[in-house]
Amino acid sequence: MILAIKYLSAAGFGAKLLGVFGNGMVQSFINARTLNPADMKKPKLAAEIAKQLRRFHHVEIPGSKEPQLWVDIFKFFEKASSLRFEAPDMQRRYETISFKEVHEEVTQLKELTDRLNAPVVFSHNDLLSGNLMLDDEHDNLYFIDFEYGSYSYRGYDIGNHFNEYAGYECDYSLYPSKDEQFHFFRHYLKPEKPYEVPEKDLKALYIETNTFMLASHLYWALWALIQAKMSAIDFDYLGYFFLRYNQYKKEKQMCLHNLTYQSKKA
């Protein structure tokens, strides 16, 4: 990740990398405030995030460019499906999960996303409000915290970001509307002339993003199960699994409808 930070810093992302030593590094101080979830919905900021994300996706990081998303999800599944909890109540909740069903969902969704031929880019993969900073005085926006950065699918990075509109309370009614998404897409696809983006390009990215949005729910749901076993943080990770997995199932039908519609129009 230090190698990635070197290239991202050179491209103007995050704090400036001042030096590297042993297992650590020295970076500059960013004089800015962390965004809150409501900020991301503001049209001006959404447009700026979209522009910056486009630039981020064009940074070339040396090494393998194979997308890691499904590799990681299947690894998470293997670990998450073979846990055992010491606390009886946690074990009982864990045993209500049908891992046969989860595996089928993961496999089917991978097949769906494979049909989209989405571009593979170096992705942030965790673009929540806490990883966005704004210098209000100079109107400068910063991406920070590249811990989950890897080559992945463009639609996943955007869909994962949209899921973060729900904020820390996970209120998914705040997920951006189609119009709000199109506003973001215009500034992502053509920052200099956003209102010249063809409608067909907006619709295609809408389908791509909202299909990969489902993968975001599966990724963090399975991640949460592992954290429920491994993390010392006082947080209901097991409950978070059910929250994200249930939201995945709720959103799935809308996604399938959109894919079916796209296929008929093709």
Image: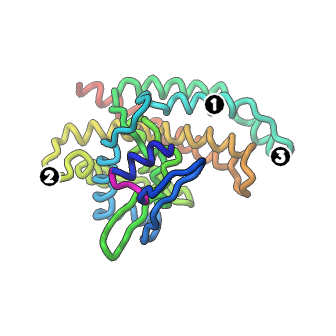
Measured Cα–Cα span from mark 2 to mark 1: 42 Å
Q: Nearer the viewer, residue 14 or 242?
A: 14
Q: Is residue 234 part of the magenta span, yes or no?
A: no
Name which quarter of the figure residue 35 lies in.
bottom left
Nearest to the eye among marks 3 and 2: give it.
2
Q: Is residue 14 part of the magenta span, yes or no?
A: yes
Please state the extent of the stretch shown in magenta in the rendering.
Answer: 11-15
Q: Which residue is mark 1?
A: 77
Give the overall secondary structure of the magenta segment.
Answer: loop
Label 2: state its secondary structure: loop
Q: Position of residue 258 (x, y in %)?
A: 35, 35
Amino acid type, residue under disc 3 in the picture = Asp
Relative to 71, does residue 246 appear above or below in the rendering?
below
Amino acid type, residue under disc 2 in the picture = Lys
Label 3 neighbourhood size at 10 Å, few (<14), some (14-19), many (20+)?
Answer: few
Amino acid type, residue under disc 1 in the picture = Phe
At x 47%, y 36%, the residue is 252
Label 3 close to label 1 by CB (< 8 Å) = no
Relative to 66, does residue 159 appear above or below in the rendering?
below
Label 3: state its secondary structure: helix
Q: Which residue is mark 2?
A: 193
Measured Cα–Cα span from mark 3 to mark 1: 22 Å
Q: State left or right for residue 198 relative to residue 105.
A: left
